[in-house]
Image: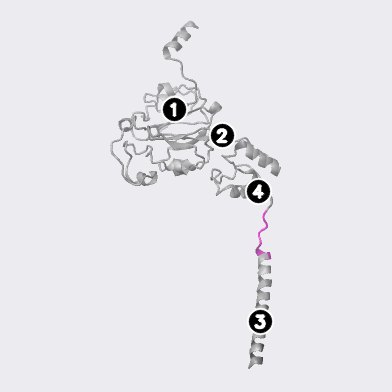
Amino acid sequence: MSDLFNEVTVFSVISLAAIGSVAAVVLFFVAQKFRVIEDPRIDVVEDLLPGANCGGCGLAGCRALAEAIVKKESLEGFSCPPGGSEVMQEIAEALGMEAGEQVPMIAVVRCNGSREFAPPKVRYEGAMTCAFAHSLFAGEGGCPYGCLGCGDCVRACDFEAMYMDEKTGLPVILDDKCVACQACVKECPRDIIEMRKKGKKDRRIFVSCINEEKGGVARKNCKVACIGCGKCVKECKFDAITLENNLAYIDYNKCTLCRKCPPVCPTNAIHELNFPPRKPKADKEKNQAGA
């Protein structure tokens, strides 16, 4: 009986060993057949990227961007907003490619419907997220296009480049911290945040309103809403301003920052940022007369 048990044990061990060996050989050849040889340059590119994984490049993260660049063998069409031109130039040198100059971009809030200009007409009591509030009502100020003030965009920013102004109820973007990752743009359910060129000396001019309602209706809910009067369009000599659906829009690729459009806007819907203060009208006319 003991001999039989020993024979069964030995047979079992030998059988398992044989099966294991065959499986190992099969797995080895399968692994060789389907193995993926990764280009070592991907690691080089990934190390040069900032590692923010913000998605500003339009891909899943820095690793995905590195893989895409190496696979395409070109930097054309790729960008790293947090790293900017400097990082792309380093990647170009490491891979022996050419990098085009990147235009610095920054996020801007195209809504000026603060509590002062768009006084609350109702009180919202519910989940404090813009996405939820957007599905329920127009907003406390009554504008169906304006900022809801719940701060989804601020929470989406990984660079502490935004905060909610308690006085106005609107988000504020910190120019020196914004890396143009577009996380806030994607998070806003009303698309009031837009990427624009940073501009020379960090100067920008844009219409801070996206309300497409007719002038009277828009103005009723917000004192600084664009009313679609078209005065800015007539004033612009560079065809940089268009008027569509009762709303003016300034094309930053055509705008020369001449500053002629803001003064003609009857509702002050056009914002000019980081410019020197304008001279008082009386002083300006006096200087022109003296000249």
Residue 4, percent from left and from top: 65, 91
Q: Secondary structure at mark 1?
A: strand
State how far apart marks 1 and 4 are (Cα): 41 Å
Q: Secondary structure at mark 3?
A: helix
Q: Which residue is mark 3?
A: 13
Q: In this view of the protein, which residue sits in the foreground, 174 or 231? A: 174
From the image, tell me which residue sits under label 1.
Answer: 271
Q: Quadrant of residue 87?
A: top right
**To which quarter of the image does residue 89 belong?**
top right
Range of magenta residues: 32-38
Mark earlier in primary sequence (2, 1): 2
**CA separation in Å, label 2 and label 4:** 24 Å
Q: Nearer the viewer, residue 78 or 86?
A: 86
**Are the residues flagged by discs 2 and 3 in contact, CB closer than 8 Å?**
no
Amino acid at circle 2: Pro
**Toward the viewer: 12 or 249?**
12
Residue named by callout 2 = 104
Kindly identify the residue that appears in the image at 66 percent across and 81 percent down.
Answer: 13
Verify whether residue 103 appears in magenta: no
- Please give the count of numbered marks on the rendered protein: 4
Farthest front residue in view: 2
Give amino acid for label 4. Answer: Val
Of circles 3 and 1, the one toward us is 3
Q: Which mark is residue 70?
A: 4
Q: What amino acid is labelled 3 in the image?
A: Val
Q: How far apart are the alpha carbons under marks 3 and 1?
A: 82 Å
Mark 1 or mark 4, earlier in chain: 4
* Disc on res. 216: none
Q: Secondary structure at mark 4?
A: helix
Q: Are the two marked residues, 3 and 1, in contact with CB atoms closer than 8 angstroms?
A: no
